[in-house]
């Protein structure tokens, strides 16, 4: 499939007339990798990878670390272009602009094996919204086809999907969705059975130890917003705020998910990034490109919930987008396992009307994609 992206803004005559105009691609490329537990190395841990090695890896992506926070569960890095989160066996890299996210795949797999002690991937998710100006991206990100071919050169079982209207707002996903890992539950309590048979009592120890592989609960919600209210966006400029903290509090970002320790950064003259981490290992991350001609805000979290309606409402009330995409991934053991039904019933959220909804079932995750526009628009 050819890269349609935002066709209205990618034709060559309009792009050449805009060559000199300031532009920043807020839309991120998001790569999430789960490594399979290593039975011969219980101490395997991605957080063993030292800082200079992350610095070198991020050079291949064309970004750098500008701030860092950690707790017992997760290391969270704010980058010059978005964020990186490192947990024991999950790694997340989210980068915007013209960064080359996938260029770090080979060095990452090498560091995971040589330093962290992981040799096998359990799952991989690479996703992004359509770019506003795809012609400004560099290889291997010059189109979803090129990204898929690049990933296919690493994996022989990857699958690529495009959800939404591919000639308008849409969202691309490449995944392995292999599953596995998690806790092994031994179901042996009821399997020592006394069988009473007609010719006497035979104590048959059936010794059936069934083992059932259940994954650890996991879920991710992303809300990708465009055409934002300029008055709200002004908060994320140095004209209005001096620091990240001031912008976090003035905008109400600190109230979106309670209990998060926030690491925030306000760029000069504008732009904002934050990571939040909780003691339980949850994260949230928000990135803001406030320039009126190409405003963009992304919100992402793995906070568990059986209902995301209130969180979505708080996020869109805070940022006032003209349009937004919401995606929810949830595996079978997640409290969010039935969120697809909730989103199906959310035809309107306050002043936002749903234009698209799609459901996908993968071997280990269910995915819901929905797109909303403010009305009247
Ligand atoms: C890195 S931030 C957040 C990016 C994020 N992916 C988003 O959601 O838009 C990007 C915003 O910061 C501004 N900015 C200012 N200085 C920057 C820098 N040195 N690197 C990247 N962005 C910078 C950009 O113009 C843009 O408005």
Image (cartoon, rainbow, N blue to C red):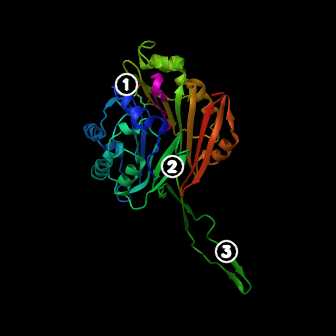
1 vs 3, front mark? 1
For marks 1 and 3, give the CA distance. Answer: 80 Å
Q: Position of residue 41 (x, y in %)?
A: 34, 55
| Label 3 Cα crowd, 10 Å radius (few <14 / some 14-19 / many 20+) | few
Q: Find the magenta span and give its range.
A: 277-296
Q: Is residue 1 above or below residue 374?
A: below
Kindly report which numbered mark, 1 or 2, lies closer to the viewer in this rendering: 1
Res 221 visible: yes
- Check residue 162 in the rendering and tell me which mark sits there, or answer none: 2
The residue where tag 3 is placed is: 194
* Pointers 3 and 2 in contact (C-beta within 8 Å): no
Q: Is mark 1 within 8 Å of ligand 1?
A: no
Question: Disc 2 beta carbon < 8 A from ligand 1?
Answer: no
Disc 3, SS: loop
Contact between marks 1 and 2 (CB within 8 A): the answer is no
Mark identifier at residue 21: 1
């Amino acid at each position: 499939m050819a890269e349609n992206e935002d066709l209205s803004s990618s034709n060559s005559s309009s792009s050449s007339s805009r060559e000199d105009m300031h532009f920043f691609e807020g839309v991120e490329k998001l790569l999430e990798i789960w490594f399979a537990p290593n039975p011969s190395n219980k101490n395997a841990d991605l957080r063993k990878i030292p800082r200079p090695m992350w610095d070198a890896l991020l050079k291949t992506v064309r970004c750098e670390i500008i701030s860092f926070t950690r707790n017992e569960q997760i290391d969270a890095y704010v980058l010059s272009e978005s964020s990186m989160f490192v947990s024991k066996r999950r790694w997340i890299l989210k980068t915007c602009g013209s960064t080359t996210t996938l260029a770090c795949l080979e060095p990452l797999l090498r560091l995971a094996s040589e330093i962290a002690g992981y040799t096998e991937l359990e799952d991989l998710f690479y996703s992004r919204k359509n770019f506003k100006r795809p012609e400004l991206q560099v290889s291997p990100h010059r189109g979803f086809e090129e990204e898929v071919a690049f990933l296919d050169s690493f994996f022989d079982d990857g699958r690529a999907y495009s959800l939404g209207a591919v000639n308008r707002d849409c969202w691309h996903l490449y995944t392995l969705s292999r599953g596995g890992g998690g806790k092994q539950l031994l179901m042996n309590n009821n399997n020592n059975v006394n069988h009473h048979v007609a010719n006497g009592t035979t104590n048959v120890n059936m010794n059936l130890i069934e083992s059932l592989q259940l994954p650890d609960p996991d879920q991710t919600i992303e809300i990708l917003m465009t055409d934002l209210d300029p008055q709200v966006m002004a908060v994320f400029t140095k004209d209005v705020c001096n620091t990240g903290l001031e912008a976090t509090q003035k905008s109400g970002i600190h109230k979106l998910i309670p209990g998060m320790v926030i690491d925030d950064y306000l760029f000069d003259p504008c732009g904002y990034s934050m990571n939040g981490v909780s003691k339980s290992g949850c994260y949230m991350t928000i990135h803001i490109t406030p320039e009126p001609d190409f405003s963009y805000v992304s919100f992402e979290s793995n906070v568990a919930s059986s209902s995301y309606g209130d969180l979505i409402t708080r996020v869109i009330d805070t940022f006032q987008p003209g349009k937004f995409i919401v995606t929810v991934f949830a595996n079978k053991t997640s409290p969010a396992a039935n969120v697809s039904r909730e989103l199906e019933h959310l035809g309107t959220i306050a002043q936002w009307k749903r234009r698209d909804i799609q459901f996908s079932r993968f071997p280990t995750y269910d995915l819901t994609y929905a797109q909303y526009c403010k009305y009247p628009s």
